Amino acid sequence: MPADPTQPRGGALLVDRDLEALVGSALLVRAGAAPIARAQISPASIDLRLGARAWRIRSGFLPGPGSVEARIDDLALSEIDLAGGAVLERGVPYLAEIEEELNLVSDGRGADLRGRFNPRSSTGRCDVFTRVLCSGHARFDEAPPGYRGRLWIEIAPLSFPVRVARGDRLAQLRLARGNAALSSADLAALHARTPLVWDGDAPAEALIDDEGGLALRVGLARRDPAGWRAAAHTDVVEFAVDGAHDPVDFWDPVHARNGRCILEPGSFYIFASRERLSIPPEHAAEMLPIDVGVGELRNNYAGFFDNGFGWGGEGAARGTPAVLEVRAHDVPFLVEDGQPFCRLRFFRTNGAPARLYGEGRAASYRDQDLTLARCFRAR
């Protein structure tokens, strides 16, 4: 969650037990929606479900003081029933209902909470761009303190047409009290106690900037393919069906001779970090969505790492590579193995969750390397 200088340090992201306790008070569902299920709740986040209706809209828009319903009246070209599933076309913006609602003033329990939204990992890896909106709030992907009302999601498939249905989970929510972000000094001390990045069996150097960001480098050497590029003119992606597709029907392999390759403008790529990342049980991390200081590319549409990602425990191998979702802009862009490629911001959480990342879930990215979304079969 972005650092708020008006909030004192020492805040925390809520963890699974806190989120479960808010179901029915701060975390609500729309009339006619199924109750929030335990499977939606991760160590420090909760998955949000698509509602029954979506609208194809003429264009995206900036959030502001007006209602989202008014924007639908102004921009909608057609209404789409998601109950039985529908195909969202590549390069077309849509707006959809979300089943969950927020009541951050309910009986005082949510009054000091702020929310932050991000795409789920599979959403980003399918190159589906999403942003969550709260009516009357002037920023995407935020729920301000005291917000009460419905949630909406803007959806734009950028590489593939995608089939989605009511109940599919494209985005997730985090709730925090206070300023949970770690400072540069906090992050350096945490890495000294519990290494956050690994290279082989040894801790890697932590590249920490003055803003509390931890840099990760792209890993192209010793991988073949070194990455994947989204193919053009593909069939429809069945977003919610695990193992539905052979990757070769949707992705072209990227080879990095001598540890370097050139990205084509407008193309979407999947790479992996050189370092292996390990998130301690009482912390979580967010990959920052863009850093113009790194280069003319957009990196990492999703990138929230729950408590325990890559955490092997005492005596176990530590760390899991982070998957990097990348689109180059304007000109061809040279990428070389070991270049700093993205930044992470770390947060303290309200203690350790009841279950760390991947525990109790049949499918997760806990053992990933250069791993595509779950709808693509492993090769």
Image (cartoon, grey):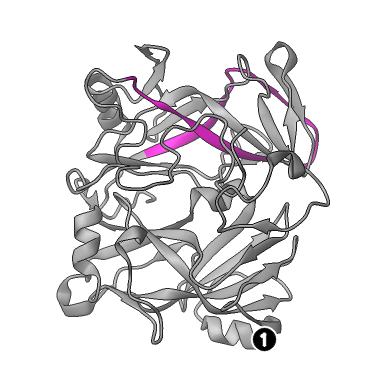
Residue reaching furthest to the right? 233
User: As shown in the figure, which amino acid type bears the numbered disc 1?
Assistant: Asp
Q: Position of residue 102 (x, y in %)?
A: 34, 74
Question: Residue 149 appears in which quarter of the rendering?
Answer: bottom left
Task: Classify 10 Å Cα crowding around label 1: few (below 14), some (14-19), many (20 and above).
Answer: few
Circle 1 is placed at which residue position? 74
Q: Position of residue 322 (x, y in %)?
A: 49, 33
Q: Is residue 22 left or right of residue 258?
A: left
Q: Residue at x 58, y 68 (%)?
A: 154
In the depicted structure, whether residue 216 falls above or below residue 246: above
Prevailing SS of the magenta stretch? strand
Please tell me which residue lies in front, 241 or 219. Answer: 241
In the depicted structure, whether residue 167 falls above or below residue 70: above
Which stretch is magenta?
Answer: 317-345
Please tell me which residue lies in front, 319 or 154. Answer: 319
Q: Residue at x 32, y 66 (%)?
A: 37
